Image: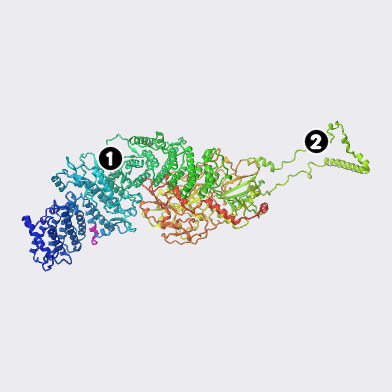
Amino acid sequence: MYAEWASLQTAIQTDPGNTSVLNIFPQTVGKDVACAVVKSMSQALSIGVNSNNADNTNRLMSEKDVKWTMEVICYGLSLPLEEHEALRDCVNIYCEWLTALNPQPKSSVPAVLLQEPNDYIQLMFKHLYNVFIPRPKSGIDLVKRQALLCHRVLRHVQLLATESMRNLSRGSWEAMLKFLLAITDTLMAPPKEKDDIGDQIGERVINVLFELWLLSCAHCFPIPSLWKTFRAMSLNWRHHDALVSQWHRINTILTSQLLKDRFGTDYPELQVSDEDGAILPTSMTQDQVIQSWFRFLHIISNPVDLSNIQIISQTPKFLHMALTSEVVIDPAQHNCLRSLPQIFFKAMKSVSILVDAFLGVSQNTVKDDMSFLSSMASSTSMSVRSSMPSINSGGSTPPERRKAKAFSVSGKHKLVHSRSSVSARSDSFSSENLTPYHLTLDSLPVLAAKRPKCNSILHMFGAWLFDGALLGVKVHGEDDMGTSRVRSSSFVDGQDRSQSVITSSSHISANKNSANEAGRAEACGALCRIFCAKKTDESILPVYLARFYIALYHALDVSENQSGPALASVLFNSIDLLRLDLDGVLVLVPRLLDAMEVVLSDTSPKIRYHDQIPLIELRKSAIHLLLSMLCLPLHFKSLTIKDIVKSQDDTTQEPVTVISLRVRITELLLKALLVEVDPMNTQMLLGGLTLLVQDLSVFEEMEKAALSNQDPLADTTTYSVTQPAGLDKDRADSEASVKMTQSESPRSAVSVGSTSSGPDLTTEPETHHQIKARDTAHGLFGQAASVVSNRLMASWKLDLNIALAAIEVILGLSKVKLNPHNSLMCKRTIKWMCDFIVYQCSRPAPSHSKDLHSMIVAAFHCLMSWLVDHHYLLQDKECLHTVLEVVELGISGSKSQNRASDPPKFKAEKDLMPASERVKHAAEAVLDIIIDHVGMFPPPCGPESTCSLLDEDTLLKMPAGYIVPEQQPAKFRYFVLENAIIIGILEKSVNSEDTLPSLTALIRGPFGRHAWSMQLRHLAKSHQNSLTVVNKDPGRPVPDDNIGVHHNITHRHFPEVVDAIPKTKSESSIPSLGQVIDENNLRQEHDKILSFIGAQVDFENKMAAKHKTDREKSPFPNPKVDCKAPSLCDEFQTARLFLSHYGFLTLEALKEPTTASLPPSLVMLNSGNESLSSDLDALDRIPTRSNDTAFVFYVKTKQTAAHSIINNVTSSANVQPQFLAFVQSLGWPIDVHRHAGWTGHMTSSWRTTQEDTPEPYAAGTGGSIYDGRRQVLYWADVSTEIAFVIPSPYMYHLTPQVIPSARPSVVETPQPVDNPDITSASVAECSPSASPQPPPRSKARRMATHNVKSTIRRSSEPYIDGRMALTSISSQETDSLDVWLPRESRKSVSILDINDTPDRSNETCVTYIPRSPSLTRDDKLSQIPPPKPPRLADTNAGPPRLADTNAGPPRLADTNAGKSQKPTKSLSLDLPQVPRVETTAPSTPPIDVSSMRKKSSTLPLSPDIKIMIVWLEAWEDHSKFPVDDLLYLTITGQEAATSKLTEKDVHIIFIHSLKSGLYRVHMKGQSGRASLAIPLVDGMVVSERSLGTLVRQTVINICKRRRLESDQYQPPHVKRKHKIQNIVSKYRRKLSEPDFFTALLKPPT
């Protein structure tokens, strides 16, 4: 910088201007003269003690007098300290005369001096030098007196510069600066000794020098020779910490002003205290600030030289001390050099602060980092004393230990954002009353958007930082004496030498020097922050990258030469290292992995890390890096990692591939998970574990699909996927790497293959089989489930956040696709979850809290997912018993049998005391899942609905075979069971040809609506022949007159044996008939009777003969007397039969309960009330599952305006292809008018409509088709449904309450993009193989209809008790109800519209939903596995098995446009019509939802948060995303009545596509007690194949956690139950028992 300028150092040091003519006389003569003259002048100038004569103040009238007097004063200033009064008077005289340039000089100033003040003042500066000359062998008291005189001189010099700056000539400025340089060099250049004059005033001298030099830069900029002299002389002062303190102070002041001038006032400001701010002259121009800043920055040359004692001690003063001292032989052994490590650390800390300032660190969360220096200094001093060589020689007594002097700098410098004015950093180096400040990752800075490029910062500070980071590391070939490499003072001076450390051989080893590790760690941290500040698409010079990688390579050394502070600083400051597109960064992955293994494998470190970085934060940093490299092995596969320090002739070591590190990464993750104790770190590790399992399973699935496409005979039954070519060797490398690691580092591996059902956390060495098991998704799945479940039961069951995260991991594992299933581990996992619930429920009453119950509820939800996704587990008797036992515990609060030996306690004997209502509701939901959905999800109508889509209107409009004649109007009759189930009964036959008692029932309960068709039959449907015989006339038999043989038989009253019995006298006691007649004269009457009998016999004989004759003459058969079959009964009162057969209709059920508020068990509703229909419709609109909505945005580079952001998705040309692929992986597209589930807004959800004139789907969009007007992306499982909406400008001026189908007239339809590869109803299909595949088409005939259709499933089991067979109508009715599917062959039967034939000639605009829409894109994106549709698989026996339910579209029931459609009813009884809100600008204030809804609304409320998924082209734009301006597009109609949406209510998932093909994730949201939902974690790097699934799971988990936190949230079935109770209270008919039966027997009216 000053190579062409001469230094003035020699001239200043040898300047004779401080000598007097009296020096040639004997000392006594000079002393007497000086004392006499000065004493007289002191009295004459009225500044002495006894001065009262003002007339003698100006006796020096001529120039000659003044010069002679100044010669005397010059000698007097050099007198010994014993002549203190004379010395003091000389100082006083000159201090008075220095006011000659003031506007009002003192009266004692001679007139001659006032005429030419600058010349005399320049001479006085030379004379005053004598005051600061050290007087050897002076006592401490005299030295202190001398210090007071020096302070007085310095104070008057400062006053002269500040008050008379405009009157000072350039010569005076230069003389003053030379004077300050001379006295500073005199005091600071020699080795520091205790209590000498330099120790007393050295800090003040340097302070004045820097301040006045800065002042001179504003008024009289120093010439280059002076700058060079300043720099050269300061090299002799670097053993004083005061120099570094003042250097940092001035640099901070100038940097603060420089940032304002160069970047504006909105740039984060390096704020300084008011006192320090006053030092900077206000008159300094921008150019002066820049020039001064650059020169002051390089005043002390390379700060790294402070770490080298040999350099600092090779000054003339140190060499002279070594020659003259009897104790110190080597200059490097002087005691003052012990503080060099502390000084070096302060210098590197100062550079680090300047680097942060240029990075624009917004440090509103960082406290004064420099307050940490005291503790670091003390620890550094201890290490220095332990590492420095002894200076003793022979048997001399060691010198007294010198106490490190505390010093401080007035004022503080803080880096704050100008808007927030929050203090951040301070340069205070005071070590008094300071405590160490611990850094946290939460305090990491948010970089300024307008920050300089990394290359620019490295140009300024790179050389110093690289030298500091490589401190103690020497290139092989250097001498053993530790000769230092040639260092450059800056990049400017040594640009050509910056590559000195990068030699061709690159043989570098570590030369440990623990004393300077603190400064080295600071340099490494600053470098990491610079490189991690790289912007998107910013390039860094390869030379810097190479030096950076070498520095980190050695800083991460874990051998015996490891540096704990440097390693900790690198890990802490480089968490973004693998999240950036740094060229060649993979070379550091093995080294980073080594360091992370040291940090994460043990919570009790054996080495000392950074004192300012707590171990928990250090482990968190390592976890961040681990999360960044989880996807690297499967992404880069067999890519070779070069060893940057490996010799070219070293061929003994095998090259390391990326995939060979996978086992080590997996092992480290599992091991860290076992030993981690911090809740936040544990949750991050759990998220990483989910990513690892999910990514590996999808990878194996894709590899298996690729292999099967290449080889049709490939074996697809084994779960161990055959690796592609080249990976077998990588796997061997991985295993060898693991073995080598275990042999070198005796770390105990975690035992994750435990087969016990209880917690087993013992660590023992793993077997080769266990290590190899992690190489497959099947094995990793089992180990992950085992580790998480064991830790959950052993350590995490008392912490809400960790328990919820662990449960989310287990729930995520339930959706991992494995072939074959790991049945044993799945069964154990369910057993562990049940044990967890039992343990939590059995805790004592004081432990029960909201958090505890939230954990239980989450566990029940997890259990639901496992039972549905692994329905085969309930075929196991033990598993089924365990689950039902836990459900019983949740509902009732106790088990029927605590032990197997206990007698069971029946339901009626138990008191219902659940842990809480929330726990009871969750257990009820699990019970419903077991009964209704396990093995049968998704239903034939698809996952869009878990219940029947039929309602009253649909059943009354069924086609032929089920139509109700108009002349016989039929109405539903409604009954309520147990105040919880509404049954609507239609007493009509299902089939017009079937005369059996039949009815149709619509059953509305807490868990949905179900349609049932019932018949009274004694035989099963399979016995069709028997039913045909009963209902048909069998005809008459063939005539036959043969009546057989006629036998004449005499009829007797008694058997013949009675005649043989002898008669007794008693038998004669009853007289005979003849005796009675004779005795009573009744003969005449008797004869008359006999005549009557005879006449009757004759008549009968005659009639018999006549009948015989007539019969012989009549035809056969006789139609008059022939038997005819009676007419069939068509009035069966099937409602009565149904209620009676199923035990609902009893006398006890009709009695009023003892509780007056409860209705009877069986209640009849007033079916004739017209408002009942609307209430039932409102009940049907209450969903059976929780529903969520996420909004997807695309942000181009530097976009901050809301209208620009939503305009991006109008065309596929505006977005990246990866974004389109990601959108499609979130779910499957559905038409909001034909969709029966959640669509993202209340106005179009849970109903199906048909547009009068359906418009074609737009083609070539960038996602705007999914804005909710026509389509959204949808995904659902048994408990949750979620819609993904991509807001577009077409809904920009729409209020959220407008039905999406209404296209605004003010917005024109965009012209389709010229892209023939994009089909309708799809925006981003990767390839035909990646497109969502609908379920297989059924063999049932497909018919077009405008009515809701359904497939009716019938059971084939016989019913023997004559009761009505109950069969579920689980989906839409088909056109013909004669489609009966037996249980063993149930399939998903779908009806698609086939009236409109797809027109393949025009793929840009069609009106049908294509089966496999596709979008052409690159081959890399086409490897994404397609989201598989949920479907039922065919099985030969037992319940059907479920295929994948993670993603995929159900079959949509399409409708035509030929028939009229009944207008859709209002969505809710309580939802009012909201006036249209005009939106004219994208920037809107917080939306007041309360003004859009009534407070009394009974609609179900979603979580009071909004979920946004933001795709970023440039990562830096996440800090400027306009959340508030986009909130008005996120209204769903479910917001709370009094809520106001603001940015704090939003969770945002930012996604950025890296050039490597991976994706960086950033989570932004509320920091609640349970807000850290996984699997996605802030900073995670995710692969493309897993991104969509993980984002979807994270969104669902965020909403679930928010529901757990909410006190107002109610599960869907509870809301439905309350609505049912409300309906009962409004429409119940209070009837007595006789009236009830009478109304039941009467036909409906």
Q: Nearer the viewer, residue 391 or 240?
A: 391
- The kind of residue on which mark 1 rests is Asn
Q: Is residue 803 above or below residue 1157?
A: above
Q: Out of 216 and 726, give the one closest to the viewer.
A: 216
Image coords of residue 1163 (percent x, y): 62, 52
Instruction: Give the image quarter of residue 364.
Output: bottom left
User: Which residue matches tag 2?
Assistant: 1043
Our reading of the magenta stretch's main secondary structure is: loop
| Left or right: 1455, with 314 as reference point | right
The answer, for residue 452, to whether it is visible in the render is: no
Q: Residues within 10 Å of mark 2 (few under 14, many from 20)?
A: few
SS class, disc 2: loop
Disc on res. 794: none
Instruction: For marks 2 and 1, give the CA distance.
Output: 123 Å
Part of the protein shown in magenta: 280-289
Name, please, the residue furthest toward the front: 50
**Mark earlier in primary sequence (2, 1):** 1
Q: Which mark is residue 561?
A: 1
Is 1517 on the left-hand or right-hand side of 1175? left
Q: Nearer the viewer, residue 1445 or 670?
A: 670
